[in-house]
Amino acid sequence: MGVRVGIGLFTAQVPATSKRTFGQEYRETLELVRLAERVGFDSAWVSEHHGSSDGYLPSMLPLLAALAAVTERIELGTGVVLTSFHDPLRLAEDAAVVDLLSGGRLLLGLGNGWREEEFRMFGASKAERGARTEETLEVLRRAWTGRRFSFEGRTLAYDRVKVTPQPARRGGPPILLGGYDRKAVLRAGRLADGYVTDETGPNGVRSNLALVDEGATSVGRDSSGLTVVLLQNAFAWRDGDPWSLIREGLVQQLGTYEAWGNGADTPELDRLDPVEPAGEDLRLSTAVGTPEEVLARLLPLVRAFGDRDLQLVVRLHYPGMDLDTAARAVELFAAEVTPALKSG
């Protein structure tokens, strides 16, 4: 079993109650990823959303370009590009530049998107989002050949276009697909180089992996070579219960999605009041405690992947958290949790 450990998702959210600035958030993200590389993390991942009152990162590839400039080894991933809101040719160009800047370290995760307001903002069709993702993937791969091509699909059409320069990696960065419903998971197996998920239990992991395998088998592909990226909240700490250090940021992280589901950050409700998950749900969402306690939560998930190529990506920085606290958590995780995860 090959296990790599990454850090993320970095979302650059700044809660309304925080005194942090977005400039500070971006600069400290660079510092934290530089530290993560020094202590042995294998990758760093960012996420996007749009029109969010807390400044949820809207532009992933510019931030990854900055990360490429201050790191040398660590892979750089998008978790995930919301394809409905991006012009595929511009995406191909931007991704190629980041891949070249990083020396071939880009991992490009794609997803459909789900939030109604974002589809309204960009004038995109939610009904066609699955087709748009599939066609974007095909266009990216054609674009990265460096040859002129034409394409005629349901949502996209190009006539004898050419994208330059080519990425550092021959054929372009690996493309991973995320998603929750059956169609999205099958699509990852059929078309992508890997699958991105944030399942929190071994049974859910196994169920999704079975769908990935099914999708691959349906087109005669061998799924054993596909990478799976598993996103998990975590926070290891030695100096007492760290719950007070992450609780407010965790509410911002998870509660933002709940609030969007209730219509926040729209013309009708132009504000964001994160909705805290009820009862124990909040604490159960995150592997938090001593390194041993965190390992006990994460190891069964890792083992559910068997001998697959797994990239476990742990969030160790939460909205509003200062750099010193996050840095201590990164160093402790790397020293006392990562080795045991990699050894299985």
Image (cartoon, rainbow, N blue to C red):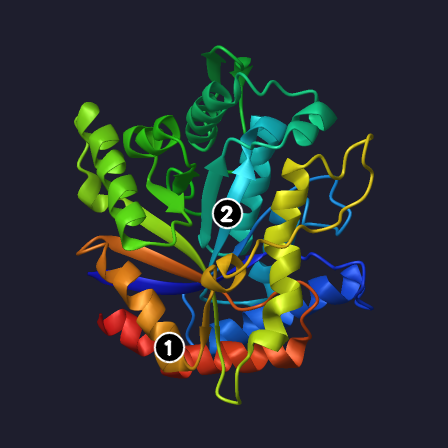
Q: Secondary structure at mark 2?
A: strand
17 and 167: which is toward the camera: 17
Label 2 neighbour load within 10 Å: few <14, some 14-19, many 20+? many
Q: Quadrant of residue 295?
A: bottom left
In this rendering, does residue 11 appear at all?
A: no
* Image: 83 above or below 280: above
Residue drawn at x 43%, y 36% as measured from the top left: 179
Q: Secondary structure at mark 1?
A: helix
- Which quadrant holds the C terminus? bottom left
* Image: 299 above or below 156: below
Residue drawn at x 74%, y 59% as measured from the top left: 14
**Residue 41: where, in percent of width, then height?**
43, 70
- Which quadrant holds the N terminus? bottom left
**Residue 67: where, in percent of width, then height?**
59, 61
Q: Quadrant of residue 4?
A: bottom left
**Residue 290: where, in percent of width, then height?**
43, 82
328 and 154: which is toward the camera: 328
Question: Amino acid type of disc 1?
Answer: Glu
152 and 131: which is toward the camera: 131
Q: Is residue 164 left or right of residue 50?
A: left
Question: Amino acid type of disc 2?
Answer: Gly
Q: Nearer the viewer, mark 2 or mark 1?
A: 1
* Image: 125 above or below 318: above
Q: Which residue is mark 1?
A: 293
Q: Which residue is mark 2?
A: 79
**Residue 72: where, in percent of width, then height?**
49, 67
Q: Is residue 73 left or right of residue 264?
A: left
Which sits earlier in the primary sequence, circle 2 or circle 1? 2
Residue at mark 2 to residue at mark 1: CA–CA distance: 26 Å
